[in-house]
Image (cartoon, helix red, strand yellow):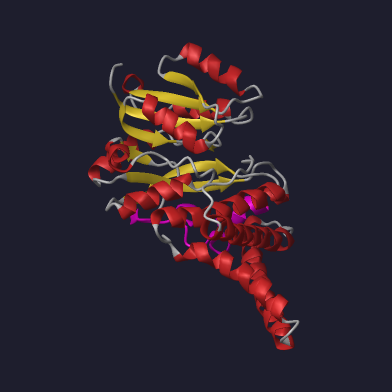
């Protein structure tokens, strides 16, 4: 097969709402089409995704369709990487829209910086027009919600970071440190990036590139997603031999403190008031951050919705983390079967 300079890999599953607009955003890229390939790896979709993709495959010979019977993102990425021919590999997501210079800029920067992975900022947009969806998108971009995750909260300069979304990799990195870990249904990007750093590699955030990401539209889906993020984080730690950032511990400490504080208050009554005061302080801070966002977006409902979304995110992640410690560190299980929602 003729070598290309760039291979773009996208895991997909039941993407009927987004797949056409996603592919259109790929087709307008300013990167030479005769020097790239797009590999769409489908997890056996049951909606119109496959038919929509096939229409594009019939029109453009650089778009390829592959199947992923295991239905897990890490398997899809590995299938795509092994089938690809590019010297540089970009991993993308179908729930996003990309600026026209996305591919060209990342390819240029990974060479200029001699990096192992580069990526841009994420602008999180609501999944629909409701206030709930707006609150979800804001919470996932707010420092109170996600900490100092720079690709979410923004940066003005190129930064040496621990992770970036939708990475752009030199093909040689997969020869050096292996492929994505298929034990991880979630957090496979985090684990792979941690492996890059552990092996002396460099990851850079390129703030001039901004990807538009469409968040989940229901709070229940957000809770499930962050539970899964927390659940698999201890498995990531076990595999890489430690934590990559302190921010990942805060939800775990928060939830553990609530459980211990209220449980031990049966024996030490003062702990009930101390724990209650700390929980009240949490919600006071959540309301303050929410008020700023409500003014910014001119939506008074956010003062009431955002604290709840913040709490769901932190409680879900922290609870998942606790379960992950039990399953992966204490019981030493290899993985866990969960349904990945969208």
User: Residue 84 or 63: which is nearer the viewer?
Assistant: 84
- Decide: is 62 above or below 95: above
Q: Residue furthest front?
A: 331
Residue 42 covered by magenta stretch:
no
Apparent side of residue 99 relative to residue 276 in the rendered image (left or right): left
Residue 211 screen position, x and y as percent: 48, 42
Where are the magenta residues, as a range? 135-162
Residue 152 visible in image: yes
At x 48% / y 12%, what residue is drawn? 59
Q: Quadrant of residue 214?
A: top right
Residue pictured at 74% horizontal, 58% vertical: 301
Q: Is residue 111 left or right of residue 326?
A: left
Residue farthest toward the top in the current orientation of the protein: 58
Q: Is residue 272 above or below residue 128?
A: below
285 above or below 269? Answer: above
Please state the horizontal and vertical placement of residue 207, each as a whole percent of the image.
Answer: 39, 50
Q: Look at the image and tell me whether residue 284 can be seen.
A: no
Residue 41 location in percent, x, y?
Answer: 50, 27
- Tell me which residue sits at (71%, 63%) in the image: 303
Residue 309 sits in quarter? bottom right
Q: Residue at x 29, y 42 (%)?
A: 110
Where the N terminus falls, by quadrant? top left
**Quadrant of the rendering where the C terminus is positioned:** top right
Q: Is residue 115 left or right of residue 73?
A: left
Q: Position of residue 57 (x, y in %)?
A: 49, 15
């Amino acid at each position: 097969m003729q070598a290309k300079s760039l291979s773009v890999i996208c895991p997909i599953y039941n993407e009927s709402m987004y797949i056409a607009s996603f592919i259109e955003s790929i087709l307008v890229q300013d990167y030479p089409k005769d020097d790239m390939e797009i590999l769409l790896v489908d997890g056996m979709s049951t909606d119109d995704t496959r038919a929509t993709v096939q229409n594009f495959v019939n029109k453009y010979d650089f778009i390829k369709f592959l199947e992923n019977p295991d239905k897990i993102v890490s398997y899809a990425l590995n299938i795509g990487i092994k089938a690809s021919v590019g010297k540089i590999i970009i991993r993308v997501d179908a729930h996003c829209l990309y600026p026209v210079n996305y591919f060209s800029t990342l390819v240029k920067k990974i060479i200029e910086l001699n990096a192992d992975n580069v990526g841009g900022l994420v602008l999180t947009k609501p999944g629909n027009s409701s206030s709930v969806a707006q609150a979800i998108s804001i919470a996932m971009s707010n420092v109170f919600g996600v900490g100092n995750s720079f690709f979410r909260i923004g940066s003005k300069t190129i930064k040496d970071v621990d992770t970036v979304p939708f990475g752009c990799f030199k093909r040689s990195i997969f020869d050096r440190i292996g492929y994505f870990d298929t034990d991880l249904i979630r957090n496979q990007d985090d684990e792979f990036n941690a492996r890059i750093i552990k092996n002396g590699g460099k990851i850079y955030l390129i703030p001039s590139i901004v990807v538009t990401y469409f968040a989940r539209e229901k709070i229940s889906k957000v809770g499930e997603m962050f539970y899964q993020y927390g659940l698999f984080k201890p498995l990531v730690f076990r595999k890489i031999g430690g934590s990559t950032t302190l921010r990942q511990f805060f939800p775990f400490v928060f939830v553990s403190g609530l459980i211990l504080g209220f449980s031990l208050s049966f024996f030490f009554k003062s702990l009930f008031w101390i724990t209650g005061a700390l929980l009240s302080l949490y919600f006071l801070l959540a309301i303050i951050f929410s008020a700023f966002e409500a003014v910014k977006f001119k939506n008074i409902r956010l003062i009431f919705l955002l604290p709840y979304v913040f709490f769901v995110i932190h409680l879900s992640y922290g609870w998942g983390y606790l379960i992950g410690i039990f399953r992966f560190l204490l019981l030493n299980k290899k993985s866990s079967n969960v349904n990945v929602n969208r």
